[in-house]
Amino acid sequence: MKKFHLKNSMSILAGIGAAALLTAILSGCNEKKNNAALSEVTDFSGHIASEVNVGYVDVTGSGKLTDTIGLARDKGFFKEEFDKISVKINLIPMTGAGPAINEALASGDLDIGTLGDVPAVLGKASGIDTKIISFSDFAGGASLIAGKGTTYTSIADLKGKQIATQRGAFMHRTLAYLLEEAGLTFKDIEFVHANAQTAAEMLVTGNVDAAVVGGVTLARLYEQGFNIVADYRTSSQYRNAGVQIARTQYIKENPDIIKAFEVALARARLYAKENKNALLEQWTSTGESASSYEYLYPGHDNYPRLRSAPDLIANYNDVLKFLLDNDLIQQSKKFSILDWIDGRFYEYALAEVGE
């Protein structure tokens, strides 16, 4: 288990109270019991849909799938599981990242979305009726990057400078933490709202002084020699935990579709665990370099946990508090992270593959 930052733990105590924290801890000690309590329904049979639309974050606009979902597709796990129930799965790249996935879930254009923690919580708080059907892990994160040849060593050196990142994404939270640690606020910088790809392009062209990005975009800038001012690999606060969410009504109407999705994901997870280079090979199959993968994921462990755990619950409560404290959502929109989880499907899937 990765170490969780002390500040996060303190903010949780302030934001949700000791009783809720105790509930989160107990959920990790007896996860199956907790998830069973979330729903009494155990019948996964039946569906009315003939297709399922799954949206994933495509920050580069290339439509590439470099992660476990890509592995599930390319190893045939999705096809095998969905052929059993005669359903077609459509994997849809979303270049607007998490916010675009939220919009598509709200409109019904997507049925399942895989996205970062901040946009997922924002979407739920905005009224999109979803359930968490599985969790990723703290494998990725966002770093603060400045231009080539610059000598900035901390965000304090960028006071008064232009810093680009995407509002309402996990990179936004990373920037907030960086500023707080330096005793600064957003008033001390010139904040430029841009998605990851645009922020990187603005940095490359010199239109901003720095950017906060992650994933493939971060790896490419690192390999091009840009200045990593704050590296996400050095602090748990700069990491994000992804999540798979589905529309609640879709879950009710198509339980065996959600089951098939989670089983395929569990199979891909197990394959990645048992084959150390599986996700490296998936990464390079899209044209990305092996060195960029090694930089981002030196442990070759960027596969999802699927199950919830105390540190994941704590992270999501901390995200909720961050959004409330920064007026990104109203206090009246606060909700229970535990009540948002439907753990039936990942528990079934993990048991199916023997985990």
Image (cartoon, rainbow, N blue to C red):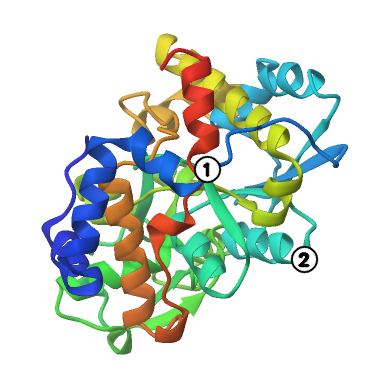
Q: Which amino acid does the dot numbered 2 rest on?
A: Ser
Vertical position of residue 120 compared to residue 244: above or below: below
Q: Nearer the viewer, residue 224 or 27?
A: 27
Discs 1/2, front: 1
Q: Quadrant of the N terminus?
A: top left
- Secondary element under disc 1, as helix, strand or loop, is loop
Q: Residue furthest front?
A: 40
Looking at the image, tell me whether mark 1 or mark 2 is earlier in sequence order: 1
Q: Position of residue 204 (x, y in %)?
A: 50, 60
> In the image, is 252 to the left or to the right of 303?
right
Q: Residue at x 64, y 32 (%)?
A: 43
User: Circle 1: is it few (<14), some (14-19), or many (20+) Cα within 10 Å?
Assistant: few
Residue 319, image quadrant: bottom left
Q: Quadrant of residue 2?
A: top left
Q: Does residue 229 appear in this view? A: no
Q: Nearer the viewer, residue 253 or 260?
A: 253
Instruction: Decide: few, some or many residues near mark 2? Use Cα within 10 Å; few <14, some 14-19, many ≥20.
Output: few
Residue at 50% x, 33% y is 346
**Amino acid marked by disc 1:** Glu
Which residue is found at the position 88% from the left and 37% from the top?
Answer: 50
Residue where numbered disc 1 is placed: 40
